[in-house]
Image (spheres, grey):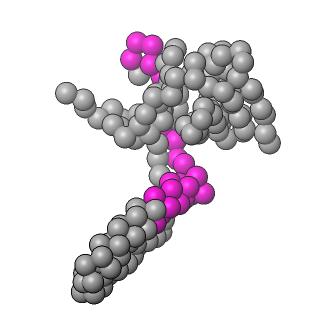
Amino acid sequence: MDTYTQYPERVTLIRAGVYGWRHAVPKEYERKSYTVTKVAGVIFALVMLILGCWLSLQNRDWKSLGITIGCVAGFLALIWLVCSFLDRLPGELTENYELTETYVKPGSWKAGYRFDFKDAEEVIVTRKYIELRAGTRNPRIYVPEEDMNYVRDYILGRVPGKALVRYQG
């Protein structure tokens, strides 16, 4: 059974071969996930609206058309309200990070996902974070300022030589 691990503020060896830490994620990065949620919700709602309208018009069932439009509007309103509520919560979202020889795992507890270093096509290094890019997977790794040099060198030493490394800011 998986148990919750309390990650330290600084990069620390938490078990054999695994470094772990937690770091606050800026609101602007957090808002990207809300934007993705809203876009996915709109796409889903449009598909449901098109199917509902098509079925209602085929059967000339105007009551079903009204119900379909109402349900889609309610779904979109719910998504908008939840994302707006989460965006207005005080404080910053905190993510946990695990770093091993072969992967980095950003996220919170079970919600995280592994990003294998061998998949990296591009690495962007800034003063506050390291972004790994491979197709649609682009995790940002936020690191305490005191540990940035160590984590940067650790990651750069494990990404493939063909990966483009860019320094910003």
Q: Nearer the viewer, residue 44 or 23?
A: 44
Q: Nearer the viewer, residue 76 or 106?
A: 76
Above or below, 30 against 2 in this view is: below
Q: Which percent across, then down, holds residue 129?
A: 64, 38
26 drawn magenta:
yes
Above or below, 106 against 156 in this view is: below
Q: Which percent across, then down, holds residue 23?
A: 52, 41
Give the residue displayed 35% in from the left and 76% down from the top: 53
Above or below, 133 against 43 in this view is: above
Q: Is residue 102 visible?
A: yes
Q: Is residue 169 left or right of residue 109?
A: right
Q: Quadrant of residue 64?
A: bottom left
Give the residue displayed 70% in from the left and 23% down from the top: 163
**How many marks overall?**
0
Q: Is residue 152 left or right of residue 40?
A: right
Q: Is residue 36 left or right of residue 70?
A: right
Q: Is residue 91 visible?
A: no
Q: Which percent across, then down, holds residue 29?
A: 58, 52
Q: Quadrant of residue 74?
A: bottom left
Q: Which percent across, then down, holds residue 49?
A: 38, 72
47 drawn magenta:
no
Above or below, 129 against 75 in this view is: above
Quadrant in which the N terminus appears: top left
Give the residue displayed 54% in from the left and 48% down from the top: 25
Quadrant in which the C terminus appears: top right
Residue extent of the magenta highlight = 15-42
Q: Nearer the viewer, residue 11 or 98?
A: 98
Give the residue displayed 57% in from the left and 23% down from the top: 119
